[in-house]
Image: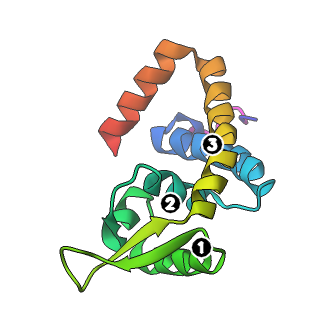
Amino acid sequence: MEPSGSPIYNYLSYALAAAHRKVNTSLSARLRKHGLQIETWRVLETLDAGNRLTMGELAEIVLMNPPTLTKLVDRMVSDGLVHRQVAQNDQRQINVLPTALGRKRMMQIRQEIQDQDSAILDQLGKSETEQLIQLLRGIS
C-alpha cells in the first residue's frame, strides 16, 4: 500500500528494506512450522557444506554478530543440532559442526527454502531473479 505523494517509496534503501521484510516474514512462517528460526537455518545450511569454520567465519557468513551467534550456537548445542570442536589448526579457536540430527533437520527444511525461492522466481522470472542476485551481491 503506497500512499500517494509519500517520498519514502522512492528510496532504494526503503525498497530493499521492504522486500527484505516481506521475504523474511514469509520464510519465518515456513520455518516456524519446523520449530526453527531463519538464523538457525542459515547456520545449518552453511555447515552442511562440510567446511570447518571458526565462530568468527560462521558469524560473517550467517550475517550475525559473534556474541549473538554464540548464544544461538549454545541453543543449537542444547537442541542437539550442532557440536563444538577445538580447531585442528589453532587450539584457541572453536569449529562448529552439524550433528546427525542437525543434518536431518536441514534436509527437512531445505524444501521450505527452495519453495520460498521458487515463489520469488515465479514472481520475477528466471532472468530477473539471476540479475537481482548478482546486483544484491554487488551491494553486499
Which is more N-terminal, label 1 or label 2? 2
Identify the magenta region. Answer: 3-8
Along the polypeptide, which appears first: circle 3 or circle 2? 2
Left or right of residue 32, residue 116 in this image:
left
N-terminal label among 3 and 1: 1
At numbered mark 2, what does the secondary structure look like: helix, strand or loop? helix
Residue identified by numbered label 3: 110
Which residue is painted at 67% across and 43% down in the image? 22
Q: Nearer the viewer, residue 101 or 58?
A: 101
Determine the main secondary structure of the stretch shown in magenta: loop
Determine the CA span between mark 3 and mark 1. 17 Å
Q: How far apart are the alpha carbons under marks 2 and 1?
A: 10 Å
Instruction: Give the residue type at disc 2.
Output: Val
Q: How is the image coloured?
A: rainbow
* Residue found at the very far front of the displayed protein: 100
Q: Viewed as shown, does residue 63 lie left or right of 88? A: right
Mark 3 closeness class: few <14, some 14–19, many ≥20 residues within 10 Å: some
Left or right of 44? Residue 134 is left
Indicate the amino acid at tag 1: Met
